[in-house]
Amino acid sequence: MLKEGDLAPDFCLTNQEGKDVCLKDFKGQWVVLYFYPRDNTPGCTLEAKGFTKNIDAFIEKDAVVIGVSKDSVNSHVKFISKHKLKISLLSDPEHKVMEKYDSWIKKKLYGKEYFGTQRNTFLIDPEAKILKIWKKVKVRGHVDEVMLTLN
């Protein structure tokens, strides 16, 4: 289990432009790394739009916002286009990065167990250490919480 103060696990995943994006690419910057279940679902859309609405404030703090889900690159392209998102979305179809970040978990619905994405956010400092972890994020007000922590 990752905890605040740990070095953030490095990763490389493909973004909506088909380019590989690695955590090490952002050394010296703040990284808001958030994991979400699925493109175009109500909560995930609200969260992505919230980060997009505040993207200029994050940029002013020298922070990049990166969302990760198991959706395909093509799904991310459509999601970004449909909602005019200004954040980077990474595709993790094999949930390898989600596993590294304790965001691929066993869930239960109607008595059946399955694995899925837990909505978590990690604030990573310019030295690649985890400053703050939000687990089981409730979308409303979350972007403001992240921004307050950055201030």
Image: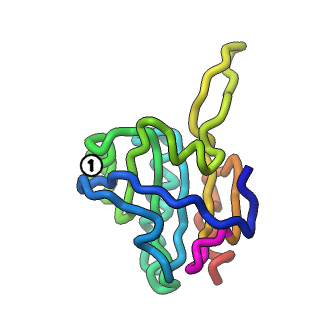
Q: Position of residue 85 (x, y in %)?
A: 35, 59
Q: Is residue 107 above or below residue 120?
A: above
Q: Position of residue 34 (x, y in %)?
A: 54, 56
User: Disc 1 marks which residue?
Assistant: 77
Q: Is residue 44 above or below residue 31?
A: above
Q: Amino acid at mark 1?
A: Val
Depth check: give the residue in front, 57 or 97: 97
- Residue at position x 48%, y 72% in the image: 54
> Is residue 59 in the magenta section?
no
Colour scheme in the image?
Answer: rainbow
Q: Is residue 36 above or below residue 130?
A: above
Q: Main secondary structure of the magenta part?
A: loop
Q: Is residue 79 above or below residue 121?
A: above
Which stretch appears magenta? 125-130
Q: Position of residue 110 (x, y in %)?
A: 68, 15
- Residue at position x 65%, y 67% in the image: 7
> Is residue 127 in the magenta section?
yes
Which quadrant holds the C terminus?
bottom right
Q: Position of residue 5 (x, y in %)?
A: 74, 69
Q: Is residue 77 left or right of residue 55?
A: left
Q: Residue furthest top?
A: 111
Give SS at disc 1.
helix
Count of numbered badges drawn on the protein: 1
Depth check: give the residue in front, 126 or 37: 126
Label 1: few (<14), some or many (≥20) within 10 Å? some
- Residue at position x 59%, y 79% in the image: 127
Depth check: give the residue in front, 76 or 19: 19
The image quarter containing residue 129 is bottom right
- Residue at position x 58%, y 72% in the image: 128
